[in-house]
Amino acid sequence: MPILLHIIARGKIGRSPEGELVDRYARRLTWPVKLTEWPDTGAGKVAEPLTPCRTVLLDERGKAMTSEAFATLLGKWRDEGVRETRFMIGAADGHSEAERAAADLLLAFGPATWPHMMARAMLMEQLYRATTILAGHPYHRA
């Protein structure tokens, strides 16, 4: 059974080129996907998971992974019975030390700092790519 890919991001993406990319890849994904937007500031709250869950923070101090390694990790979690993976994209100040310590993975898209809306589009494409790698689909041509 596929994992629910839950992207939780600060800020509204609205109608934008990045929003169009997010929508395009969300429609192409065969795994379930959920997008939750929180305000730029203030507390955001998401329900406690009822099933096994992993939390991934997009963080400039995180681990850079190849698409294949990312796909392998998602496949491993799926095979272990994880039912939801939450991908957290923070506000301009990033994540707190407590949030980093509690995460299952800190993930970086290289050493550069990316705009939050672009990071959301890049994450959605990488999720699509990872699921196609796991399915043996020719989208990823490595």
Image: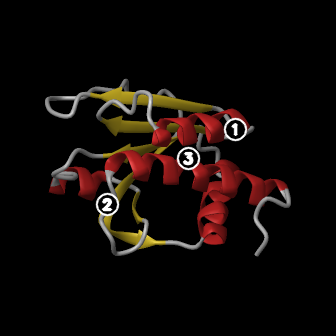
Residue 55 visible, this angle: no
Mark nearer the viewer, 2 or 3: 3
Mark 2–mark 1 distance (CA, rounded to whole Å)? 24 Å
Q: How many marks?
A: 3
Residue name at image x 55 percent, y 47 percent? 124
Q: Tell me which corner region of the image, top left, top right, bottom left or bottom right, holds residue 134.
A: bottom right
Query: In x, y percent, where is residue 91?
Result: 22, 44
Position of residue 113 in the picture relative to residue 19 (left or right): left
**Rendered-image quadrant of the C terminus:** bottom right
Position of residue 140 in the picture relative to residue 70 (left or right): right
Secondary structure beneath label 3: helix
Residue 67 visible, this angle: yes
Please name the amino acid that badge 1 sits on: Trp
Q: Nearer the viewer, residue 113 or 64?
A: 113
Residues marked 2 and 3 touching at CB (< 8 Å):
no
Residues marked 2 and 1 touching at CB (< 8 Å):
no
Residues marked 3 and 1 touching at CB (< 8 Å):
no
Please name the amino acid that badge 3 sits on: Met
> Which comes before the other along the chain, label 2 or label 3?
2
Q: Is residue 97 positioned above or below 2 on the image?
A: below
Q: Is residue 72 positioned above or below 93 on the image?
A: below
Please name the amino acid that badge 2 sits on: Asp
Numbered badge on residue 59: 2
Instruction: Report which residue position mark 1 lands on.
Output: 31
Instruction: Report which residue position mark 3 lands on.
Output: 124
Residue name at image x 59 percent, y 64 percent? 70
**Rendered-image quadrant of the N terminus:** top right
